[in-house]
Amino acid sequence: MASRFLTFPNPVNEYAARSTAGLVVILAVVTIAVNSWWLYAALVIGFALRVAAGPTLSPFGRLSVHVIVPALGKTRMVPGPPKRFAQTIGLVITGAGLILHVLGVTPADRIVVGLVVIAALLESVFGICLGCIVFGFLQRRGVIPASVCEACAGVRTDAPKLQVPTPHPR
């Protein structure tokens, strides 16, 4: 039963991911403005819940999947593993922000959360997932095996190879 709740969907609706990112932007901006430990903790918990179970346990994920996206009426399915990777990066960054805040290292705590604002804003507004870009880079380099996201690997292997001309000897 627990394994059913602790799975990340694959594929995911890009519009759900983007609306969740929009909600993260709002919470992160409020966190920077108010500068309270429990808001930093709320960011960390939200990312941890999304890494563990996608939208299943996350209030932002549930709001996006069950309210926002149905109201938009948009669907564009994309591979789930890069989105989970992006959520993991968000977890690490917000975790660092929380630790910095608890240790009293300001303004570093706010700057770190500001990075999340930038990344989540790019995802929400433009559909640019920085974590997904890093995932693709690492997969192309063999750091992340193709088996983690076969759909992602298939897209990359079908792309034409760049031909770099060799310089002529002088």
Image: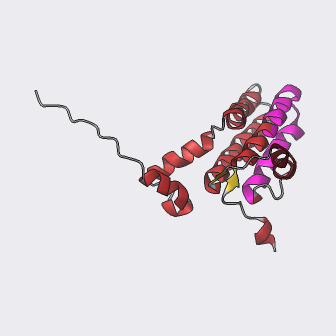
* Image position of 30 (left or right of 129): right
Image quarter of the C terminus: top left
Q: Give the prevailing secondary structure in the magenta stretch.
A: helix
Q: Is residue 14 magenta?
A: no
Residue at 45 percent of width and 55 percent of height: 142
Location of residue 10 (image quadrant)? bottom right
105 over 9 or under it: above or below: above
Total marks shown come to 0
In the image, farthest residue toward the front: 73
Residue at 49 percent of width and 56 percent of height: 153
In the image, farthest residue toward the left: 170
Colouring scheme, one of rainbow, by chain, secondary structure, one colour: secondary structure
In the image, farthest residue toward the bottom: 1
Q: Nearer the viewer, residue 107 or 8?
A: 8
* Image position of 139 (left or right of 102): left
Q: Picture coordinates of residue 79 (x, y %)?
A: 62, 55
Q: Is residue 50 magenta?
A: yes
Q: Picture coordinates of residue 22 (x, y %)?
A: 78, 37
Location of residue 98 (image quadrant)? top right
Q: Picture coordinates of residue 123 (x, y %)?
A: 68, 38
Give the magenta range.
23-52
67 over 57 or under it: above or below: above
Image quarter of the N terminus: bottom right
Q: Nearer the viewer, residue 133 or 42?
A: 133
Q: Nearer the viewer, residue 108 or 42?
A: 42
